[in-house]
Every structure is written in C-alpha cells, then in structure tokens.
Amino acid sequence: MIDVIRKEILYDISQAIDILEVKEEKDLNELEKLSEHAIDDVALHKDTDLITITVLIYSIYKIVHNLSEEDYKNIVAELKFTKKHLEENQLGRYNQSIKNLYNLIRKSDAKIKQHLQDVMQAARIKKSSSLLQKGLSIGQAAGLMGLSNWDLQPYAGKTTYFEQHHESIPAKRRVINAMKIFGV
C-alpha cells in the first residue's frame, strides 16, 4: 500500500473512532462530513482501499442510529484494531479487520441485514455522483466504485450538477479554436 494512501486511510479511521467513541447527537453530522471528505481522497487517488473505507464509513453513517449498544461498541473496538494493524503495516490483519467490520454491519440488525446490499449500492452510487462533480467521467466514476455505467447513468441523469455547469469560453470561440487545431 502506498504511504500516502495509508495516511489518508489512517486519518479517516482515526476520525471515525473519535466521532464514535463517545455517543452524541452530533455523530451523524460528523460521520456525514467525514464521508464527504473521504470522497475527495477517492477522487484524488482513485484507490480501491480508499473506496472500501469510504463505503464503510458511509455505511456506518447510514446504520449507526439502528445499532444496539453491543454492536456499536464492537464496531468501535474493531475500528481501533483496524487502525492498529494499519499503523503496524500488518496488511493481512488490516484486511481481516475490514472484513470483520463489514460482517458486524451486516449482522447488526435484521432490517439492516435485508437491506445491506441496498445501502452498499446507495453508498457507491452517492460517492460515484460526487466523483462526477469532481470532473471524472461516468465510466471512470462507475469503474472506481465497482458499478457498471448502466447503474450510474439513471442517477447521473437526475443530478442537477450538469445543469449548473457553465462554460467560461463562448461556443463560437471554442468552434474557432477547434477549426484552427484541425486546420479547417
């Protein structure tokens, strides 16, 4: 794992632990902000480990209010193990901790268990749309999040970002530049 990616993941995990360690009302807002921060890292580095952490944080954000006290404590404890293993560069144990976190999320609640795939899919689609806003193509955003173009296109079509985008160079000037480039 590249050191820059490792530092970004450690930052995200540390922040999640800080947010969740003491249960407070503001936790939801802080998890949402952390999730949005993580997408900037994904857009910058385009790394699958960052995507995994981003989807994990977003999933915790979506289910944290439904967690039992025991599951909540288990998730915080496993996040601490995850951080420790990554700090010690024990990637095998780190990957096992990530798998354990996803299993804890899956088993946390019968209702969540039924809809976990929807939560994961929604997380990927939400994050993919953020990637679109950061300038990636639909194909790049879908590929990074493990989706097909077809999965992302209906959502991308509903966003208003593309309507808000305005070109700073008039169309006439762009056509003239294109004609110069092609020698027409």
Image: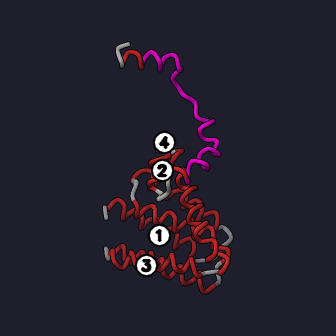
> Where does the magenta region start and end?
151-177
- For the residues marked 4 and 3, what is the alpha-carbon distance in whole angstroms? 33 Å
**Magenta span main SS:** helix
Residue shown at 56% from the left, 66% from the top: 120
**In the rendered image, which quarter is residue 151 located in?**
bottom right
Circle 3 or circle 2, nearest the eye: 2
Left or right: residue 165 versus residue 99 is right
Which of the two labelled residues, at mark 4 and mark 1, occupies the earlier sequence position? 1
Of 75 and 141, the residue lying toward us? 141
Residue 157 in the image: above or below residue 3? above
What residue is drawn where x is 65% and y is 83%?
Answer: 68
User: What is the secondary structure assignment of the residue under circle 2?
Assistant: helix
The x, y position of residue 69, in whole percent, is 63, 84
Q: Nearer the viewer, mark 1 or mark 3?
A: 3
Tags 4 and 2 touching, CB below 8 Å: no
Label 2 sits on what residue type? Answer: Ala
In the rendered image, which residue does mark 1 sit on?
13
Question: Height in image: 95 above or below 58?
Answer: below
Residue 141: give its label: 2
